[in-house]
Amino acid sequence: MSNRPVANDDTRTPQVVYALFLAGLVTANITLLIGVIIAYVYRKEAPPWLQAHYRYLIRTFWIGSLYFCIAFVLSLVMVGYLLWPLLAVWLGVRCVLGWRALRSGKPPARPTSWLG
């Protein structure tokens, strides 16, 4: 990463995507789908440290989709209902950690992580 100051214009789009992901907690995940589409569109043009954020967001979507499917299947046998709140907490923590790094002008700490 360069030592230049972080311009608000550089970080505006990933901030919107993080907000859309968090809004997915109350919009039945519709905004998550919108957010991942935006991340796919903007990731190639971004500076390398912001590309790491887009990668992190895209991975968050796909890992979350996998966890969603697992929780759904397990809900058919009543076990998955315990996983829904954990999935919501996981998404919230992941977005907050990424957003904090973005606001600090840094890439996410562990963009390839499955947990946080």
Image: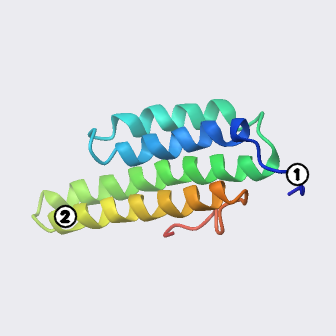
Name the foreground residue: 53 vs 80: 53
Q: What separation in Å lies between label 1 and label 2 (alpha carbons)?
A: 47 Å
Q: Secondary structure at mark 1?
A: loop
**Quarter of the view holding residue 64:** bottom left
Residue at which label 1 appears: 4
Rendered residue at 31%/48% (across/down): 25
Q: Position of residue 100 (x, y in %)?
A: 58, 61
Which of the numbered marks, if any, corresponds to residue 80?
Answer: 2
Say if 38 sits above or below 76 in the image. Answer: above
Q: Amino acid at mark 2?
A: Gly
Q: Position of residue 96 (x, y in %)?
A: 49, 60
**Quarter of the view holding residue 99:** bottom right
Rendered residue at 44%/40% (across/down): 20
Q: Residue furthest left?
A: 78
Q: Position of residue 115 (x, y in %)?
A: 49, 70
Name the foreground residue: 32 vs 18: 18
Rendered residue at 42%/40% (across/down): 32
**N-terminal label among 1 and 2:** 1
Q: Secondary structure at mark 2?
A: helix
Q: Amino acid at mark 1?
A: Arg
Q: Is residue 3 left or right of residue 107?
A: right
Say if 8 sits above or below 99 in the image. Answer: above
Callout 1 touching callout 2 (CB < 8 Å): no
